Amino acid sequence: MGKGGMSHGESKDGEGENMAAWLLGVNTLKIQPFKLPALGPHDVRVRMKAVGICGSDVHYLKTMRCAHFVVKEPMVIGHECAGIIEEVGSEVKTLVPGDRVALEPGISCWRCNLCKEGRYNLCPEMKFFATPPVHGSLANQVVHPADLCFKLPENVSLEEGAMCEPLSVGVHACRRANIGPETNVLVMGAGPIGLVTMLAARAFGAPRIVIVDVDGHRLSVAKDLGADEIVKVSTNIQVCDYVFGSFTFSYWKTLYAWLA
């Protein structure tokens, strides 16, 4: 899928059509055939078992765009995913059929300086699942580079494997903010990304974590997951000014997480 595909056709070896969730227009999804690309020597074919729904998928569904990425033609959605290896290319030595894997959804060029420095997420030629015009992974099967499929430990479920991608956002934020045992943390937003950022901060050793949101239910979930303090703010700017003015945040390391 990340290597491309077409909207119709039979999958190989007479296995029947590979089906996918296609975004056809505003609030319009349809399950229809998706032809897999040929399996290259360094690729694997993966049967999808778990695919998360990201905020970007919702944006595309509701508006056909996310920031400056615009859906101009039918597109398969989904990028948070895990599955089971069905077939491996001739040069793949690290994976075998039956392996459970989480997929890195971004295919970089592997040639530019950013890629060679290990900062492949910033590659200017990035091809990312479900980012126009690249198709996503909400399908029966996908073809993907073996190097971007990571074997899951036995104690990690496929559903948890699909959450590796959003979890990586929280891990990256904690690394950027140098979170450690002496760092108190404020997380702005208790949506899915805010929650995994909170969990990552705790794993990094943060002794006190406060999370802020406008939604009481989200805050209750954050509290259940281990937030030390929760703060519900109003959408009224004057009230927000008062609430934030009653705290001293000068000593806090701040992690910004979108309300998703």
Image (cartoon, rainbow, N blue to C red):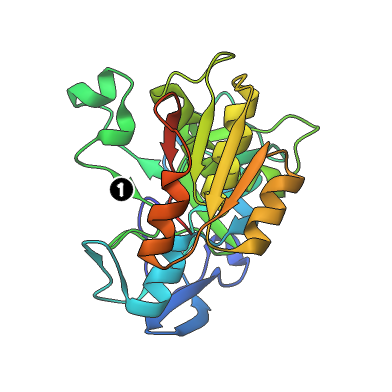
Query: What SS does tag 1 mark?
Result: strand
Residue 35 visible? The answer is no
Position in image of residue 99 (x %, y %): 69, 37
Q: How many marks?
A: 1
Residue toward you, 216 or 234: 234
User: Which class describes the residues within 10 Å of circle 1: few (<14), some (14-19), or many (20+)?
Assistant: many
Task: Decide if residue 30 is on the left or right side of residue 47.
Answer: left
Quadrant of the drawing holding the N terminus: bottom left
Tell me: residue 96, above or below residue 59: above
Residue toward you, 108 or 117: 117
Position in image of residue 170 (x %, y %): 51, 36
Residue toward you, 77 or 232: 232
Position in image of residue 221 (x %, y %): 71, 53
Residue 227 visible? The answer is yes
Position in image of residue 79 (x %, y %): 48, 54
Tell me: residue 42, above or below residue 243: above
- The structure residue drawn at horizontal position 27% and vertical position 25%, both measured from the top left corner, is 115
- The structure residue drawn at horizontal position 28% and vertical position 76%, both measured from the top left corner, is 73
Return the residue found at the far right: 155
Q: Which residue is mark 1?
A: 127
Task: Decide if residue 258 is on the left or right side of residue 131.
Answer: right
Amino acid type for the residue under numbered disc 1: Lys
Residue toward you, 37 or 155: 155
- The structure residue drawn at horizontal position 53% and vertical position 55%, both measured from the top left corner, is 213
- The structure residue drawn at horizontal position 33% and vertical position 20%, both measured from the top left corner, is 118
